[in-house]
Image (cartoon, rainbow, N blue to C red):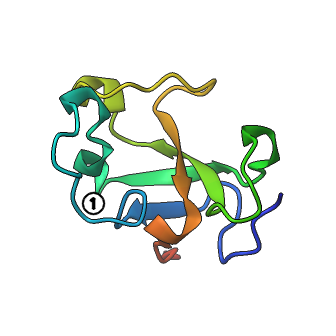
């Protein structure tokens, strides 16, 4: 399903939450503590989450390629695109584009 949000391909975003939360649940393994990416900047690389097998009730996701490598933070990151994770659309905010 295509997302109908305020994002476009290659748009720069900042991660404000992960899975709708600002901190990791208690007991989260360090290699799955993706909440450490909060505040990181990236670019939207894919808005079509239909191949993820999500139900209609699940939050929509977009593929964000971060400037920082999640692997360098000890996080699992095994998507087809380096430094990229599927994040909930509502967890990111667009950054303004500045023209010189």
Query: Who is closer to the viewer here, 15 or 50?
Result: 50
On the image, numbered disc 1 is attached to which residue? 39
Location of residue 28 by image quarter: top left
33 lies left or right of 18 = left
Q: Position of residue 25 (x, y in %)?
A: 23, 52
Query: Who is closer to the viewer here, 32 or 11?
Result: 32
- Please state the total of marks drawn on the protein image: 1
Which residue does the image show at 60% across and 28% down from the upper left? Answer: 81
Tell me, yes or no, if residue 51 can be seen here. Answer: yes
Q: Position of residue 8 (x, y in %)?
A: 70, 65
In the rendered image, the vertical position of residue 26 relative to residue 33, given as above or below:
below
Which residue does the image show at 27% across and 60% down from the upper left? Answer: 39
Q: Position of residue 95 (x, y in %)?
A: 46, 72
In the rendered image, the vertical position of residue 25 relative to residue 32, given as above or below:
below
22 lies left or right of 84 = left
Which residue does the image show at 23% across and 47% down from the upper left? Answer: 36
| Mark 1 residue crowding within 10 angstroms, few (<14) / some (14–19) / many (20+) | few
Tell me, yes or no, if residue 92 can be seen here. Answer: no
In the rendered image, the vertical position of residue 6 relative to residue 19, given as above or below:
below
| Element class at badge 1 | loop
Q: Quadrant of the N terminus?
A: bottom right
Q: Position of residue 9 (x, y in %)?
A: 70, 57
Which residue does the image show at 51% across and 22% down from the upper left? Answer: 78
34 lies left or right of 91 = left
In the rendered image, the vertical position of residue 30 relative to residue 87, given as above or below:
above
């Amino acid at each position: 399903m295509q997302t109908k949000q305020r994002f476009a391909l290659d748009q720069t975003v900042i991660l404000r939450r992960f899975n709708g939360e600002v901190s990791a649940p208690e007991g989260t393994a360090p290699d799955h503590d993706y909440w450490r990416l909060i505040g990181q900047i990236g670019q939207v690389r894919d808005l079509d989450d239909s191949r993820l097998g999500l139900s209609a009730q699940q939050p929509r996701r977009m593929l964000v390629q971060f400037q920082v490598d999640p692997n360098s933070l000890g996080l699992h990151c095994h998507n087809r695109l380096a430094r990229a994770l599927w994040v909930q659309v509502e967890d990111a905010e667009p950054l303004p584009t500045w023209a010189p």
